[in-house]
Image: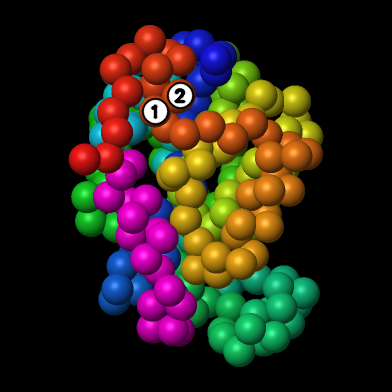
Amino acid sequence: MPPSASRTAIIVVDMQNDFCSPNGAMAALGSDISANVSVASRLPRFLDSARALGCLIVWVRQSNREELVSAARRRQAQTMNRDVLTVCKAGTWGTELVDGLIPAPGDPIIEKSRYSAFVGTPLHNLLRAQERDHVVVCGTAANVCVDSTIRDAYMADYSVTMSSDLVGWTRKDLALSAIANLEFYFCEVMHSDELVSGWGGLAWQDE
């Protein structure tokens, strides 16, 4: 059973146009975004249930700015044959949440410029101020920003859960390996139905 909803924050990572829309940057680069699209379609129902039960919903968006790009990061982007600002350049349509994902009034929205939602952001202070010591991480990508966020949350002594049906990717081979490694070392992995039931809500299954 997961910790109580009143102690839980749902961290929604990078569910943005550039990762989840067929017109976004990742699709234009030839990546398979189908897993991200599936997550985007499932998230609203889960988030509505979690919010109603007392969870804090925190939206995290990647926003890349030229002045924050290091030489190391620029070199790594070159190895992937792309410009470092190709994906989620600050101020562009690509950084906006994909259609169908709409924060509720009062949901915090945090911008990050690194893979982890904890690096260079007020996320840790927000969670402490809201007395949330359990985080559920969902979004994309399982092997990149979700992975980095889970690792940092665990190392900061949060209880961490990954929602198995609400994480996406563009590289399934890397994502599945990352999920297995995260479950062994850093977090519990649970289906969203199990989480909702554990908080005392009515679970739902795909029709």
Tell how many labels. Answer: 2
Q: Which residue is mark 2?
A: 195
Q: Give coordinates of residue 178: x percent, y percent.
A: 67, 54
Q: Position of residue 107 (x, y in %)?
A: 36, 31
What kind of element bears circle 1?
Answer: helix
**Quadrant of the drawing holding the C terminus:** top left
The answer to which of 111 and 19 lies nearer the viewer is 19
| Residue at 73% from the left image edge and 82% from the top image edge | 75
Quadrant where the N terminus is found in the figure:
top right
The kind of residue tagged 2 is Leu
Relative to 115, is 136 on the left or the right?
left
Q: Which residue is mark 1?
A: 193
Circle 2 sits in a helix, a strand or a loop, which is it?
helix
Nearer to us in this view, 137 or 184: 184
Marks 2 and 1, how far apart in space?
5 Å
The reply to whether the magenta stretch includes residue 78 is: no
Q: Which residues are magenta?
A: 27-43
